[in-house]
Image (cartoon, helix red, strand yellow):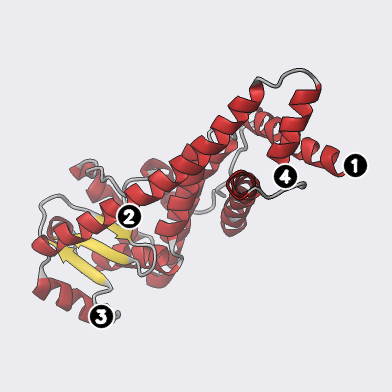
Amino acid sequence: MVKRQSFFILTVSILITSIIAIQMVLYAVSIFAGCDMKLNMVSVCHSWLKEIGLSSLMHVLDGLVVYTLLFSLWKIGLQWIQMTKVKQHFQQYKERELTKKLNQVFKLGKECIIVLSHPTPAAFTMGFIRPKIIITTGLYHLLNQEELEAVVAHEMYHKVNRDPLKVFLLSLSSSVMWYIPIQKWFYRQYKVVQEVLADEFAIQRQGTVVHLGSALVKMVRVGKQEKMPFTFVSFAATAVDLRIESILNPVHEFRLRLPIKTVFLSIVVFSIISGLFIYALA
C-alpha cells in the first residue's frame, strides 16, 4: 500500500511538472527561434485573451513563463554550487579510518559510507548520481552496533532508491510551480512515505523493530539535526512521531489523506490550461 502511494505521488507530480514545463520550453523556443508552435498552451492563451479584450494579461503570461524557466535554472545551479562546496568541506572532516572500517563491517562498496568528525549525531544520504551515506562520529558513539546497522539499512534504502534526486525534483517543482498547490503537498508527503518505506526495509533486514526504534528515540532525545543548504534525506528529520507510532503499532496501516480543497484548486488551474489546449485543436 505504501509503495503504491509513493509511486502515485511521484508519478502524478512529475507528470504535472512535465506537461507544464514542456509547453513553456516550446513557448520560449518559439519566441527566440521564431518558430510557430501551434500546439502550445501558452500561445493559445495569448490568442484567446486577445479575442476577449484582455491582451494586457499577455504580459502576465510572458512573465510567468520567464519566471518559471529562470527560477528553475537558478535553483538547479544553486543546488549544484552548494553540493560542490559541501563535498569539499566534508573532505576536511572525513574520518578515513572509521570510514574504511564501517564500509568493511557492512560489506559495502568503496566509500559507500562516509564518516565525518562532528559531535552532532546525524545520518543522511546525499548526492544525485552516486548517493553517499553520511554518518557523524556523534552518531557512531551514540548508537550500539545493532542500532547503527538499522540506521545504515535505512539509509541504504534511500541510496538505492535515489531518493535525494527524487526529493530535489519534487522540491524544485513545488517551489517553482507554486501556482499548482498540490505540488507542495506531494513534496511533503513523498518525504514522509519514503521514510516509512526505509524504516520497513531496515526492520525486514534485521527481523525486529527494536534496534530501529531505539535509534530513533535516542536521536530524538539528543535534539534536532542541523539544517543544511542542499537537498538530502535524513534519518531523523522527517515525521519522527509518525514513524515511531508506526513502529510501535505495525498493524496500523499508513494512509495518505488528500487535501480536498488543494486538490480541487489544482485541478481547476490545470484544467484551464488543458481546456485552452483542447480549444486550440478544435
According to the picture, the residue beneath numbered tag 2 turns out to be: 80
In the picture, measured across the screen, residue 111 lies left or right of residue 161, that is left
In the picture, measured across the screen, residue 230 lies left or right of residue 202, that is left
According to the picture, the residue beneath numbered tag 3 turns out to be: 110
Which comes before the other along the chain, label 4 or label 2?
A: 4
Point out the residue furthest to the front here. Answer: 34
Which comes before the other along the chain, label 2 or label 1?
A: 2
Q: Which amino acid, mark 4?
A: Asn
Question: Residue 282: which numbered mark, if any?
Answer: 1
Q: Which amino acid, mark 1?
A: Ala
Which comes before the other along the chain, label 3 or label 4?
A: 4
Q: Which amino acid, mark 3?
A: Lys
Q: Does residue 228 appear in the picture of this structure? A: yes
Which comes before the other along the chain, label 3 or label 1?
A: 3
Query: From mark 4 to mark 2, how far is it between C-alphas?
Result: 31 Å
What secondary structure is found at the residue carrying circle 3? loop
Q: Which amino acid, mark 2?
A: Trp
What secondary structure is found at the residue carrying circle 2? helix
Point out the residue furthest to the right here. Answer: 282
In the picture, measured across the screen, residue 53 lies left or right of residue 233, that is right
Q: Position of residue 67 (x, y in %)?
A: 50, 35
* Quadrant (top left, top right, bottom left, bottom right) of the N terminus: bottom right
